[in-house]
Amino acid sequence: MIKGFIFDLDGVITDTAASHYTAWKKMSDEMGWDFDHKVNDKLRGISRMDSIQVILDHNTTSLSEEAKAELAAKKNDLYVASLENMTSEDYLPGAKELLIHLRTEGFSVALGSASKNAIKVLKQLNANAFFDVIGDGNSVSKSKPEPDIFLYGAEKLNLQPAECIVFEDAESGIDAAKAGGFYSVGIGPKERVGHADLRFDSMAEATLFEVKAHFKNLFS
């Protein structure tokens, strides 16, 4: 039986993609590197340091670990500054309604995000009350597609992976959910998250009713 839900943050609860893109773009422009939306899509769901490596590979460039860390910090400073403009109105359509519904029905809920700024984002959204456990980029050492962040959330909820449904908008996130033995709901296009157990184009469509209807044998 399903007892818990684990949510990715960016692209599921709120959309910080534009802020991330702007920060990566500014950093890349200053370095004289090519960076566009196609490269940015490859960064979805992965850690900051892994993102730097993707950008370096795209530009057939290499840097020392120290230099990469400096650039990652610079990008993060740009991104964090932009979060000050985020408010409780910045949930993706349907996300807050689903979180409220899960609270009403008594499900356990965890965050499973690669972001090291997740706590700041939740604070800006005024979303902390919806989560029993916060798993973020500081919680585990291996990021998606490794399942560690979801396994961390399930353990802290005192649940088995098979008792949890993961909501993800990234290919690497669905891969992580599958690797950990979780049920998965993909948010986004088929070519990105079509390998999830269930897929919706947007969070607005991903109501608890629809999820229960699909996984009907897993709800009492």
Image (spheres, rainbow, N blue to C red):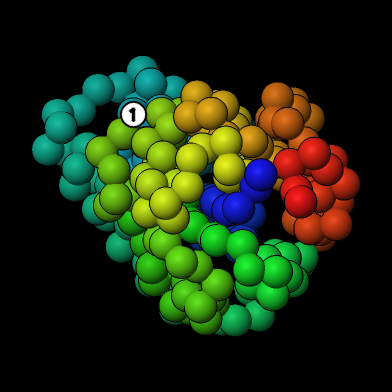
Query: Which amino acid does the dot numbered 1 rest on?
Result: Gln
Residue 186, position in %: x, y?
Answer: 70, 39
Residue at point 42%, 51% (across, down): 158
Q: Quadrant of residue 32?
A: top left
Question: Which residue of the protein is positioned furthest toward the top in this rendering?
Answer: 60
Which residue shows up at 81% across the image and 58% down it? Answer: 207
In the image, residue 120 sits, relative to residue 62, either above or below, namely below
In the image: residue 203, left or right of residue 77? right
- Measuring from the top left, give residue 153's x and y in whole percent: 42, 50
Neighbour tally class for label 1: few under 14, some 14-19, many 20 plus, Cα within 10 Å: some
Residue 50 visible:
yes
Taking depth in this image into account, of 62 and 34 the one nearest to the observer is 62
Q: Which residue is labeled 1 in the image?
A: 53
Disc 1, SS:
helix
Residue 178 percent coordinates (x, y):
56, 27
Q: Nearer the viewer, residue 133 or 125?
A: 133
